[in-house]
Image (cartoon, rainbow, N blue to C red):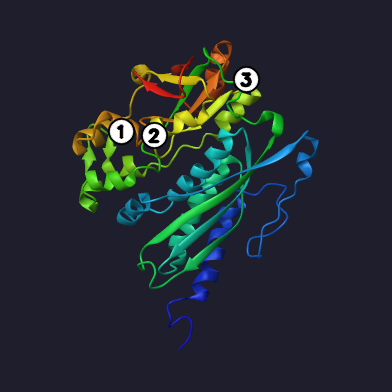
Amino acid sequence: MDYKKAGVDIEAGYKSVELMKEHIAKTMRPEVLTNIGGFSGAFSMEKFKDMEKPTLVSGTDGVGTKLKLAFLMDKHDTVGIDCVAMCVNDIACAGGEPLFFLDYIACGKNYPEKIAQIVKGVAAGCEQSGAALIGGETAEMPGFYPEDEYDLAGFAVGVVDEKDLITGKDLKAGDVLIGLASSGVHSNGFSLVRKVFDMTKESLQTYREELGMTLGEALIAPTKIYVKALKSIKDAGVRVRACSHITGGGFYENVPRMLREGTRAVIEKNSYPIPPIFDLLAKTGEIEEKMMYNTYNMGIGMIVAVDAEDVEKTMDAVRRAGETPYVVGKIEEGEKGVTLC
């Protein structure tokens, strides 16, 4: 008996690392001091000495049951973007710049080419956010996961000068809410998605006229990464007073997290176009409107609150970053919470 006969192929692990190196190399930053394959990743903080009070911000998350879709479609090169996005968008929400990322892949059997495809997506997400992929772990766990399945999670660290932290403490009535368009469902609520739609290859490969693509293509679309958009707003000289990443829990759970006591967000549902995937999801699953807004991003992946005088500068900055902004509402005095009208 040996480790390979027990189900763990060390040689496959070595091959996975070699195959992923070309993707990882594209994410490198000058602050990275170590190479992939060591026991840890080292990152120099020398560049941030000029900050008055350099402050580390971090985020960790996974992809969730969207991975089940990747298994069915045998498409593994974009879920890594989802993983990175879920972490770095939270960092950007605090005003931070993502510095580096680490991933964790647990699988039933290590297929090197598949692992490399997953890491290719992680590296693409890191490139989009400017984070270096400085390490990670691939754990082969036979008997714990089915041979053709895996889980994917990650962890990111960023930095922000303490004075630039976005906390919501300066939020006031009259501030304007600007929403940044999502790419679709992103990476939340897939347990419900998988109950609503027939999760078969045939169903996922069927072209849907209302979507302009197959159902699988619409659902697998990777989560938007808003790091560059938030940086563009800051570079335009706009102070973001509050920010919310619209993830699991939709508007009702996430918008209140950006508010201080005594302020209420009022969002107009008709202020932006809702992507057709949400209409199809609600109709097919007979899901009530409130539940949709309490589960999904409904076409808005990030919301920022800015002074009314900064609206046009903010909109222009978001567009320069390649994203689509909408004025979706405003801040009023009142009980902390959100009103959708």
252 vs 321, nearest the viewer? 252
Kind of residue at badge 2: Gly
- Between tags 2 and 3, which lies in front? 2
- 39 displayed left or right of 245: right
Residue 140 is situated, as x and y percent measured from the top left of the image, at 46, 69
Q: Residue at x 70, y 39 (%)?
A: 55
- Between tags 3 and 1, which lies in front? 1
Position of the N terminus, as image quadrant, is: bottom left
Residue bearing the label numbered 2: 250
Residue bearing the label numbered 3: 238
Q: Residue at x 41, y 69 (%)?
A: 109
Q: Do the residues labelled 2 and 1 touch (CB within 8 Å)?
A: yes
Residue bearing the label numbered 1: 292
C-alpha gap between disc 3 and disc 1: 32 Å
- 306 displayed left or right of 193: right
Residue 297 is situated, as x and y percent measured from the top left of the image, at 38, 33
Q: Can residue 205 be seen in this view?
A: no
Q: Which of marks 2 and 1 is nearer the N terminus?
A: 2
